[in-house]
Amino acid sequence: MPSVSSLDEAAAALTAAHAEGRQVRIGDDLTAGGLNRILEHDPGDLTCTIEAGVRLSALRAALAASGQRLSLDPPGDPTIGALLAQNLSGPLRHRFGAPRDLVLGATLVLADGTIASAGGKVVKNVAGYDLARLVCGSEGRLALIGRASFRLHPVPRATRTLVVETEAAADVVGKLLGSQLQPSALDVLYPGRVAVLFEGSERAVDAQVRATQALIGGDETDTSVWDESRDRQEASKGRVHFAPGSLADVLAGLANAVIRPAAGVAFTLEPIPSVDQSQGASRGAEALVERIRREFDPRGVLAS
Amino acid sequence: MSLPASLVAELQAALGTEHVVTEPEQLRVYECDGLTGHRAVPELVVLPGSTEDVQVVLRACHRERVPFVARGAGTGLSGGATPVAGGVVVSLARMNQILEIDLASQRVVVEPGVANLDVTRAVAAEGFFYAPDPSSQQVCTIGGNVAENSGGAHCLKYGFTTHHVTGLTFVLPDGEVVELGGKAPDPDGPDLLGVIVGSEGTLGIATRVTLRVVRTPQTIRTLLAGFHTMDAAGAAVSGIIAAGVMPSAIEMMDRLTIEAAEHAVAPGYPEGAGAVLLVELDGVVEQVEDDSAELERICAEGGAFEIRAATSDADRALLWKGRKSAFAAMGRIATDYYVQDGVVPRTRLPEVLRRIEELSAHHGLRVGNVFHAGDGNLHPLVLYDAEAGETEQARELAEAILDACLDAGGSLTGEHGVGMDKVCSMPRMFSERDLRVFERLRRAFDPAGICNPGKVIPTPRLCGEVPGPYRIHALERIGVAERL
């Protein structure tokens, strides 16, 4: 099946598969690669609406021209559709959240070819069900994501990175999170290092770097540590979710990982099964997703 | 319609007779929420004390196909908690315990009946706060906040309830209990929390909520800028957003509301102002100083004739008091008013405000504007006199204002919700196809159609009815729940 270049084409492709009872794997059998236009970007609103086939790098370049950005920095260069469907984030997750925190609305194509929109393009909106959030992390199993609107942020005027060499990463992280400093990113590159990113005005970033050094030490470095963090995230074989307060316990059980403490996630080099230590482990979530799938895709067209 | 006697007996046995309300006078207490124009007396009110109690109630309702409506403090403004005649109201008022405070994880676990402000009170001494701050925060409950995805003045920077809920114990309409998320954010799989938060009580009942609390900022700075015109103030808001300054709140008031507030609580707003902006910055000291300087520059260049910063906590509280009293103050200058809740893209603010002025003149009714300008969330107050027969005129004007918001690319509701109030307006924002997909989502959770029916998604039967006029809500009258 081809790469579609319009919502109608996507709907037609899915309608046909639905009629024939044929399974479709979004991202493989059907991609939104041709849906690659930035539909709307009004810098004064700090929002944009884009088609799901747009690559993150292309969006980044377009927004940078207005001094703005989508504050998501996952590894690689995913399409916006993949970014949402896999709920991808990177170091900036610490301050700005995951895709579900920045998405404002989406247009979806359901397995039977129904095109439907939810949410909107304004930053505040509670009308209707939040299907744009629902499809975050859905791995293409609820619908094809056709387009989406996002909240944007200004590109910061100044950016500085500190790296703290430490054998006691949990203490270092605890001190920083307990302070009133506001890093944009905070990653543990385990074992051995904690990386901290500050963004903002020159004066504010400078003050925060100095305050952080007084609190936990560390040396300024270039931004390559963030590339390393993303590379290790991408190369990881396992993932652990944990309550942020149990960082020390989690670290004790790991050998080599990148950990994003505020997001309660560790990307491990070892192939461990996805473990949820978040105290209150999900119960019934999968069955509930299945109930939604049966309504959205009763014939099971969308394969995982 | 009356309930099977066996159902009442069953619930009395399970919950205790004292937690099942059957007396007509007592049932009447629950006949409406903050949207007082819609009323219906429930057949039964139950006050469960635990997740298990809620499960018992919902299982029984499901078995008998009896509709139910969950209720927190009843401060909602869109009729999300309006009972269904002949149905059951499930009040979560008894489930009001803070279960766990885990500041190492920056989480607080609460029952749904806990009041919003009590979360902040529980962690303030340790230097944390719960960010969503709807104006009814002294009394409104976390369960209600989850249902409505409540915001507040400071959601411009901190986001809404959906950004602060990481886990839920949730009872589905058939009584099944699910545990979603936990203290860690970003669970694998589709974002069920994301679709449940803000679903207006139509997908089930939350019985335990894990909340993210935030470290208090180093400093807070509150500025007041007076402008001659709304146009100039609106343009300044766009300028602030475009410049990349991120205040925690930007509130705007027009001449009518300034005068009313001044009369009511004398906050000392600039004399003769056609509009004021109340802007708050918080965070690291140096950042707040730099942003404050830029903000003052933008306001001055945009025609602000007076800019002042709060000099003390008391001064800051007074500036906010003026803003928060604005709705109640309107009660002094008009016998009735209707609060609209629309959203526009922030760059369209000046043009939509002009349009509202035109519409106001055209319909011959005054409109006060006091709203969350930073996120484009308008709250025009349509002033009218019901006894003079202006109700219908007021309704038409409020609808026309909503149309202007939608024409500008905005939304039907920024924070009050759809509920009963705007259910018939949904087709103005969503297509028939969109609404049918919403129905499919709802059916996945509630195939029997018993969970808060008649809200959010329009039906032909429902939308033939004309809503009654707004009447002042009891909580509002006693001054604890302003319409903000």
Image: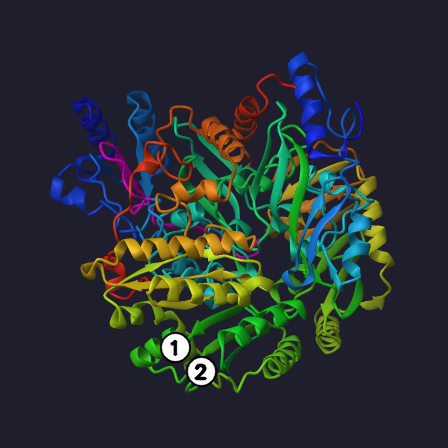
Residue B467 in the image, given as x and y percentages of width and height:
28, 46
Q: Residue furthest front?
A: B362
Residue A174 in the image, given as x and y percentages of width and height:
64, 60
Rendered-image quadrant of the C terminus of chain A? top right
- Do the CB atoms of the residues marked 2 and 1 lie less than 8 Å apart? yes
Rendered-image quadrant of the N terminus of chain A? top right
In this rendering, position of residue B208 left or right of residue B214: left
**Residue range corresponding to the magenta coloring:** B81-107
- Sequence-wise, the earlier of marks 2 and 1 is 1
Residue A151 in the image, given as x and y percentages of width and height:
64, 54
User: Is B1 located above or below residue B454 in the figure?
Assistant: above
Q: Quadrant of residue B474?
A: bottom left
User: Residue B68 shows which numbered tag?
Assistant: none
Circle count: 2
> How many angstroms separate mark 2 from mark 1 (CA)?
8 Å
Q: Which residue is mark 2?
A: B273
Compare residues B103 and B437 and report the one nearer the observer: B437
Residue A257, visible in the rendered structure? yes
Q: Which residue is mark 1?
A: B258
Compare residues B450 and A107 and report the one nearer the observer: A107
Q: Amino acid at mark 1?
A: Ile
In this rendering, position of residue B6 left or right of residue B132: left
Crowd band around label 1 with a 10 angstrom C-alpha radius: few (<14), some (14–19), many (20+): many
